[in-house]
Amino acid sequence: MVVMLSARLPTINYALPSGRDCKYTGQAVRAFPIRIISVGKKRSQGVQLVVDEYIEKLKLYCSVEDAHIRNNPKNARDWRAQVDHEDSAVMDLITSDDWVVLLDERGKDIGSEQMAELVGDAGNTGASRLSFCIGGPYGHGKRLRERADVSVKLSSMVLNHQIAIVVLVEQLYRSWTILKGQNYHR
């Protein structure tokens, strides 16, 4: 499978690995700052503990920022207005030189090695930060969908934002251990 990554930044074409290999395993990879933007209700204490634990582990490899946006920030009654308000709040956090990964049930189905390559390749785009976006209950807005450099899915099942962020931070940690050739991923 080949993913075309394009936006305002240089285009990168890369073949996603079909096996357990990553083209960057054990090589020097740029410590690329990561921002996780999630929309949803306040996280439960247990979920926040797990997220914080993985973010601390990730900080061994790169800087990480966790930005949480309350869903329906303007208390709109119409779900479309709710998505538009959430879309604006997310877009306010994204800069023109971010490399944006939209997490969406309709995105590319990738494995852990492919996520590692996505992280490794992002450092070659000229972007200053890698931003992962988790949508609210009604998904992502139009502006963010148009702005995203790539769309991937964490699962074929729909995940609520609390589960999605736990899966994402664990996969980001797993990606970095794959990139560094460490023995976490088996």
Image (spheres, helix red, strand yellow):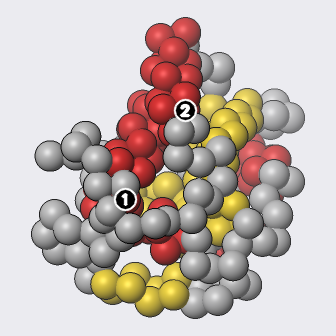
Residue 108 in view: no
Give the quarter of the figure containing the N terminus: bottom left
User: Tag count in the figure?
Assistant: 2
Q: Please give left or right for residue 35 compared with residue 50 in the image.
A: right
Q: Nearer the viewer, residue 128 or 9?
A: 128
Q: Position of residue 67 (x, y in %)?
A: 71, 37
Q: Residues within 10 Å of mark 1 (few under 14, many from 20)?
A: many
Amino acid bearing label 2: Ile
Q: Please give left or right for residue 42 compared with residue 49 in the image.
A: right
Local SS, label 2: helix
**Residue bearing the label numbered 2:** 55
Q: Point out the frontmost of discs 2 and 1.
A: 1
Residue at the image point whose x is 76% and y is 50% from the top: 90
Q: Please give left or right for residue 71 compared with residue 178 in the image.
A: right
Q: Please give left or right for residue 164 compared with residue 101 in the image.
A: left
Residue 142 placement: quadrant: bottom right
Q: Earlier in the sequence, mark 2 or mark 1?
A: 2
Examine the rendered structure and indicate whether residue 137 appears above or below residue 4. above
Cα–Cα span, label 2 and label 1? 17 Å
Residue 183 placement: quadrant: top left
Local SS, label 1: helix
Residue 29 in view: yes
Disc marking residue 53: none
**Residue bearing the label numbered 1:** 179
